[in-house]
Image: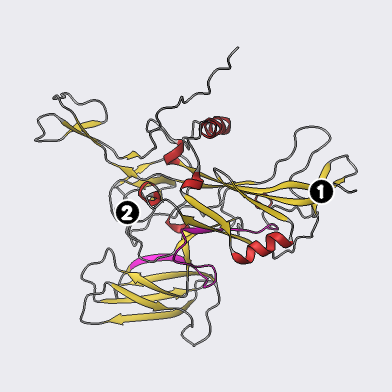
Amino acid sequence: MASIIYKRFFEIRILHDYFLSSNNTSFFKNSLSDQDRLDILKNKLAHKHLDLTRDLEIKPDEKSERLLKNQRIRFARTALGLLCYIEVKREQLNDDTIVYRPLIPIDNKLKLTFTITLKNPLFSNFTLGRMKPRIPAIYHLDNLNDSGNKNFPSLSLPVEDFTNEKHFEMGELSMIGGILKEAIIENTNPGDWQNIEGSGFVSDRDRRVISRKFTYSFTTNPGLKEAEFILSDDSATDIKSIPLTGTTILQSVQLDFEKDNTETEIPPGNYQLRVTDGTDVIDIKELYLNDDLYSGGLYGIFEITPITPDADFQLIRPDGFLVQRTPPIGNEISYPIFEMRCRSRISYWRYKSDQPINPAPTDLDIVPGSADRILVSEQPRVLSLAVSGLPLDPPEASS
């Protein structure tokens, strides 16, 4: 009787500053090695300080649920995200390397979609993201590195370069002079930012899946009475414009991009939306228009394509075998582990003392008129979960 073999196909880990950082030190600090981060993860998981199933519901959508079954792929939720196993046949190459071929051949166009829904209504309170998005888009993270500028293992698009045509909320990310920075106040000024460590973070650029009909809100342009919305395709060709002129102040408008200026159907895909006040550009947003993927009740989606051109992000090699394999000498080559890297929100912290404090400790300022009793941080600090009642280090084994 032939044995049934399942191997790990791929994993997605959601790594969140809020749960993983401490003492105002980010989990993504450059000085930490991969082993350091792995040790932190193991420690948090061992003491049950980290379980994102309490905050997020991740599951395959209806179509992918059928695909998983047909392809003999098993889906499992983990404390960090999700893990998929696939049924395989074990083979041995001429050099004695042990490899695994999917029992059911994988189609080149196969795509698996997993939805992300908020279970914890407070998740957005400590997770970086626009509080007042102009477009109600949802996050989209995938392993198709079409642009060639994603860095494995992060599934996020690179953070956008700063532009004063865009209004930034406090904590939002931008590349300024080739350096990753976060806004320390709500602004359109390249000077109101601070450097941060790490890379591959989820940003507003990933919040881009929307249906072809949606509402646009003028959250940062009070008094505007005139606007034009211009949609361009991935070749930078303008395909539709929607001008708005009136006597009343624009607050929110319904936009319809089902058809272009020639009344031709606009297919699902990547587009750019520019918004002007009639003269100047006041907003630019990359969009992934897709009626089937979008649902207003979702936080985001993962899209995983097993066969991709980028070797770093593929699940199946060109020879048809899984990435995971065991050479005759050396360590086993692992299955792909992708990451969704989430930044915590930042905030200026205020501390109140029963007794006067003067001078103020380092990095704190005394609030004028508080009789030296209220202090505020000089710079915003990352929010992190305070854990109590359990040791941070594994207990020593008893004899």
Residue 294: % across, % down: 50, 68
**Placement of 223 over or under 2, stated as above or below:** below
Q: Quick one: label 1 or label 2, which is nearer the N terminus?
A: 1
**Placement of 165 over or under 233, stated as above or below:** above
Estimate how packed mark 1 is, as few (under 14), some (14 to 19) or many (20 or more) residues with alpha carbons within 10 Å: few
Front tag of 1 and 2: 1
Task: Check residue 4 in the rendering and tell me which mark sits there, or answer none.
Answer: 1
**Where's the C terminus, which quadrant?**
top right
- Looking at the image, which residue is at 85% across and 46% down? 3
Name which quarter of the figure residue 220 lies in: bottom left
- Looking at the image, which residue is at 44% across and 80% down? 240
Q: Nearer the viewer, residue 127 or 398?
A: 398
Estimate how packed mark 2 is, as few (under 14), some (14 to 19) or many (20 or more) residues with alpha carbons within 10 Å: many
Tell how many labels. 2
- In this picture, which residue range is highlighted in magenta? 282-308
**Placement of 259 over or under 179, stated as above or below:** below
Q: Nearer the viewer, residue 43 or 309?
A: 43
**Residue 231 visible:** yes
| Residue position marked by numbered label 2 in the rendering | 169
Q: Which of 264 and 280 is in front in this view?
A: 264
Identify the element where label 2 is drawn. Answer: loop
Identify the element where label 1 is drawn. Answer: loop
Furthest-bottom residue in this view = 263
Q: Do the residues labelled 1 and 2 touch (CB within 8 Å)?
A: no
Residue 85: % across, % down: 70, 49
Residue kind at label 1, given as amino acid type: Ile
Q: How far apart are the alpha carbons under marks 1 and 2?
A: 52 Å
Residue 67 part of the magenta-drawn span:
no
The scheme the figure's colours follow is secondary structure
Residue kind at label 2, given as amino acid type: Glu
